[in-house]
Image: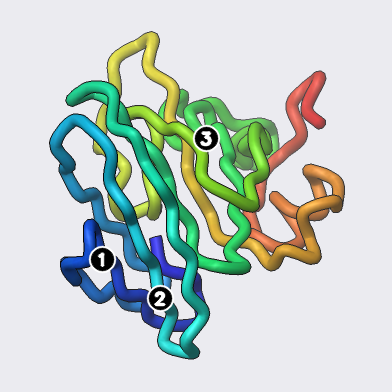
């Protein structure tokens, strides 16, 4: 996933595979074994990640240099149809904050447009969102409502 403010080029094992537009996500399938992934932004910042792909099910988010992301659990917001008296859905919960690579699964999505139209009852939906690194220590509410701009109500126990 490229940062929101510039393009990023993805190279694997020395071969350039893709240039991503700001905010664009791309999944790249790799054979099992060791791989070198290099990400270079349009401004020239470069980071290299050494990956060891253990199976065909293994997935990892690999950020560019200086990229920080928040992961919000947004299942109830998009899929339960639950609303309060004001017609607002429950706010997503900030589950994770990352400055570096992290493992993901098929429950992670990288834009609202990529979310499925329906999900199975026991499915969890996580949305990965770019955030400025200086916001990593802010409260969940400051990130979810203040920066990401989600509107909704705070369910009991929401943090």
Which image quadrant is residue 154 in?
top right
Question: Farthest residue toward the top?
Answer: 122
Residue drawn at 67 percent across, 38 percent down? 94
User: Tag 2: Cα neighbours inside 10 Å, few (<14), some, or many (≥20)?
Assistant: some
Residue at 58% of width from left, 39% of height from top?
72
Nearest to N terminus: mark 3 or mark 2: 2
Q: Secondary structure at mark 2?
A: strand
Q: In the rendering, at what x and y percent does residue 25 appear?
A: 32, 59
x%, y% of residue 59?
A: 33, 34
Residue at the disc numbered 2: 40
Residue 140, located in which quarter of the rendered image? top right
Neighbour class for label 3 at 10 Å: few (<14), some, many (≥20)? some
* Residue appearing at x 64%, y 52% in the figure: 99
Residue 145, picture quadrant: bottom right
First in sequence, mark 1 or 3: give its number: 1
Instruction: Determine crowd level at label 1: few under 14, some 14-19, many 20+ residues with C-alpha closer than 10 A.
Output: some
- Camera-nearest residue between 125 and 128: 128
Q: Nearer the viewer, residue 29 or 75?
A: 29
Q: Vertical placement of 94 versus 76: above or below?
A: below
- At a point 72% along the width and 63% down the height, the residue shown is 133
User: Is residue 73 shown above or below 135?
Assistant: above
Q: CA distance from mark 1 to mark 3?
A: 31 Å
For label 1, the SS is: strand
Q: Contact (CB < 8 A) between labels 1 and 2?
A: yes
> In screen coordinates, is 107 left or right of 145?
left
Residue highlighted by disc 3 = 74
Residue at mark 1: 11
Q: CA distance from mark 3 to mark 2?
A: 30 Å
Front residue of 117/54: it is 54
Relative depth, front residue between 87 and 9: 9
Q: What coloring was used for the rendering?
A: rainbow
């Amino acid at each position: 996933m490229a940062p929101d403010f510039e393009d990023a080029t993805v190279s694997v094992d020395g071969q350039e595979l893709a240039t991503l537009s700001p905010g664009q996500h791309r999944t790249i399938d790799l054979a099992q074994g060791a791989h070198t992934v290099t990400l270079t932004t349009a401004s020239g910042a470069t980071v290299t990640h050494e990956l060891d792909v253990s199976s065909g099910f293994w997935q990892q988010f690999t950020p560019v240099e200086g990229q920080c992301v928040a992961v919000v659990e947004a299942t109830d917001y998009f899929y339960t149809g639950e609303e309060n008296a004001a017609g607002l859905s429950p706010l997503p919960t900030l589950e994770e904050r990352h400055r570096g690579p992290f493992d993901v699964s098929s429950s992670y999505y990288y834009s609202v447009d990529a979310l499925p139209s329906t999900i199975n009852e026991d499915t969890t939906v996580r949305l990965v969102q770019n955030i400025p690194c200086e916001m990593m220590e802010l409260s969940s509410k400051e990130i979810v409502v203040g920066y990401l701009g989600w509107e909704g109500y705070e369910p009991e126990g929401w943090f």
